[in-house]
Amino acid sequence: MTTRRQQLGWIYLSVVLVVAIACRFLVGRDVLGQWTFAWPTSDSIEWRAGALISAFLAGAALSLSGIFLQTLLRNPLASPFVLGLSAGSQACVAAAYWIAAIGGPWMLMGGAIFPATVGALLALAVTLYFGRGKGGGIDPISLVLSGVIVGTVAAALASLIEWLLPLEMRPALAGWALGRVPEVPEISVAVITAIAVFASIFVGIRNGSTLDAMGLSEDESSSIGIHVARVRLYLVLGSSVLAAVATALCGPLAFIGLIGPHMARSCVGPRHRASVLAAAISGSTLLIAADAVRHFAPASTGRLPIGVICALAGGPFFLILLRRGAAKAWMR
């Protein structure tokens, strides 16, 4: 049964999403490069609609990946960025660029979805391996520290590979690595991302009670009929694919996958039947709003990368969520 607080939470999420979409659709730049706030011309409507679709899908994918990782690991700090999945995808995509440069263009067919997925899975596997405690279970502190190290090493590897690339290929990879919201997204990447997002929402809502039970201990989950190992496998694969497709579409972005789930739980509570859909909406809202904000920055040196906005705004915003009770929402 939906409480009044949850109803207000849904209204809040809906209003904020609509405002973010309106702002991104109305904010643009004129021929002189100055930002404007007006209805777009007929020539620019398609471009802004493409950016909205890209931000909507990538933001939802990152936030869904975050909520599944937090459920899998019972850790409110888990996210694709913190656990190194985004950096792992970045490293493998950079390797794909390098292979393409030396004669293997097939590596980038399909918009780098395959190398991004492989990188996310490898990064998560390494993080989980080194994040184990003495008893073989997951230790939250070790897990986060392992994720930070894996992410740092993977990002450094991506930078090294970028340095090895031919000069003419470096700008494309460097721009993608800093984060972008493509106004003309590659059709294959957008379609795969959309399928992953909507399939994850459907499965998450349908199996909400199972995901709720995963918050219990392993023995307690098993005692009520949950096949823990199978659910964990699905969560690992699902969160990795979601992080990979979002990274392939918009590059490695920080904090969206961490803030989105907490924002959702703060609005509609911790039950997964509600929080999965709310997390998708929250992630989309955050990335669309960040894309709108970056247009206000001076464009004399080029358009500000979306990754910079996410990193600068994400940290303080996450602290605000914690202050307003996001941690308590996780524990209820």
Image (tube, rainbow, N blue to C red):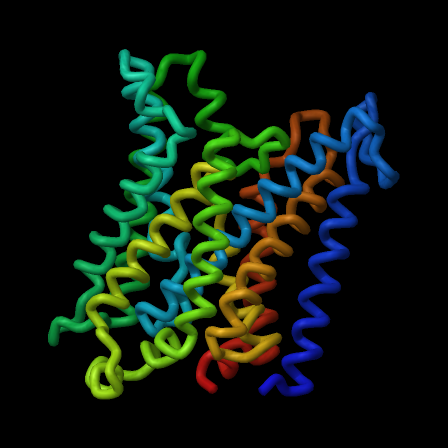
Q: Where is residue 97 in the image (x, y as percent from the top left)?
A: 35, 23
Q: Quadrant of residue 112?
A: top left
Q: Which residue is drawn at 55% across and 47% down?
A: 57
Q: How many marks?
A: 0
Name the residue nearer the viewer: 190 or 91: 190
Q: Where is residue 182 in the image (x, y as percent from the top left)?
A: 59, 33
Q: Where is residue 65 in the image (x, y as percent from the top left)?
A: 42, 57
Left or right: 289, with 222 as reference point: right
Q: Which residue is drawn at 65% across and 48% down?
A: 288
Q: Where is residue 229 in the image (x, y as percent from the top left)?
A: 20, 69
Q: Which residue is drawn at 29% across and 41% down?
A: 119
Q: Residue at x 72, y 25 (%)?
A: 300
- Quadrant the N terminus occupies: bottom right
Left or right: 137, with 120 as reference point: left
Q: In which quarter of the image is residue 80?
A: bottom left
Left or right: 131, with 189 as reference point: left
Measured along the vertical axis of the image, is residue 56 above or below residue 102?
A: below
Question: In the current view of this chain or complex, which residue is farthest to the right?
Answer: 38
